[in-house]
Amino acid sequence: MSERPNIIDAHHHIWRLQDLAWLAGPVVPRIFGRYEPIKRDYLIDEYIADVAPQGVEKSVYVQTNWPLERSIDEVRWVQEVAERTGWPHAIVGSADLMDDDCGRVFAEQARISPLMRGTRLQLHWHENPQYRYAPVPNQMHDPAFRRNLARLRDLDWSFGLQVFSGQMEDAARLVEDFPDITFVLIHAGMLESDAPAIREAWRTGMARLADYPNVVVKLSGQGTFNHRIDRPFISGVVADCLRLFGSERCMFGSNLPVEKIWTEAGPLFAAYDEALTGHSDVDRANVWRETAARVYRI
């Protein structure tokens, strides 16, 4: 097995419990199961202690579902953490892209932090209500959403695209209509299980999205549905993504601390390292570092 290059973690979270109502409130069923093990502050020092032994030297913070009306506060807090500690090295925030005030929010986030590199509004919708985040499956076609999405071009920000396979045809229309925006496909397209019909629908949707060079894949969150480190499952997802998109459009993200519900950082990184066994040094460098460095400009 080749030695890992220095790693950029393209997807991690830090949080203060008081800022996350979903985490601080009563335990309710969620897409990743029961979350008592992580129902506490997860701050930057603990994150660094988790990932530094794995070779991570830079990271990208991705929004943690603060209330949308506090999207500016979230960026302000993360920027303060970065100024104090040097981590993270880039920020993906959030905002209400269904609100015409979104442009003001983006402008203020950009003013507050030079680390801003993108935004995410979770669009994933599923027949299973427990898996559902967006109120409707095709929110991405709402005129207000599209007006606000277009603002990302002037900011040179990416959009974190989080959808299930049943939404990928609509997502393909979206990315085709905005060729100057980079879309980062979160959790490698949210494959719910290894059942043949589900996997085939996912592969079909992923092949459709791979036609567009402005889509890159984040290899993250593969314990979301099975709530464990499933090495064959991770290897299969990684292999399909590399085949469809090429390593120059794939990047690793730890999704910590959510993955700590069922594992620790060491086994998580080792599973992806195993999935990359047999791939070239160039492919490994792209997944572990180069793609994220390019997309997030760090």
Image (cartoon, rainbow, N blue to C red):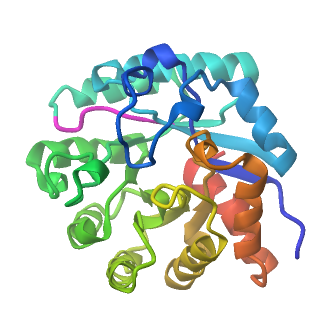
Circle count:
0
Span of residues in magenta: 92-98
Q: Position of residue 229 (x, y in %)?
A: 64, 61
Determine whether 6 is above or below 191 in the image.
above
Image coordinates for residue 272, horizontal then vertical, percent:
70, 66
Residue in the image at 50% along x and 36% along y:
35
Any part of residue 70 in sight: yes
* Residue 93 is a magenta residue: yes
Q: What residue is rendered at 64% in x and 19% in y? A: 81
- Seen from the viewer's position, the closer of residues 208 and 275 is 275
Q: Give the position of the C terminus as an image quadrant.
A: top right
Q: Is residue 208 above or below residue 24?
A: below
Residue drawn where x is 23% and y is 73% of the image = 169
- Would you identify the image quadrant in which residue 154 lies? top left
Q: Is residue 286 left or right of residue 165?
A: right
Image quadrant in which the N terminus is located: bottom right
In the image, residue 41 above or below residue 197: above
Residue 205 horizontal/vertical position (percent) = 32, 77
Q: Measured from the top left, where is residue 164 in percent x and y?
A: 31, 64
**Horizontal arrangement in the rendering, residue 153 relative to residue 51 (left or right):** left
Q: Main secondary structure of the magenta part?
A: loop
Along the line of sight, the residue nearer the viewer: 48 or 160: 48
| Residue 55 can be seen in this image | no
Q: Tell me: 270 left or right of 138.
A: right
Asked if the stretch drawn in magenta spans residue 204, the answer is no
Q: Is residue 54 left or right of residue 230?
A: right
Residue drawn where x is 37% and y is 56% of the image: 181
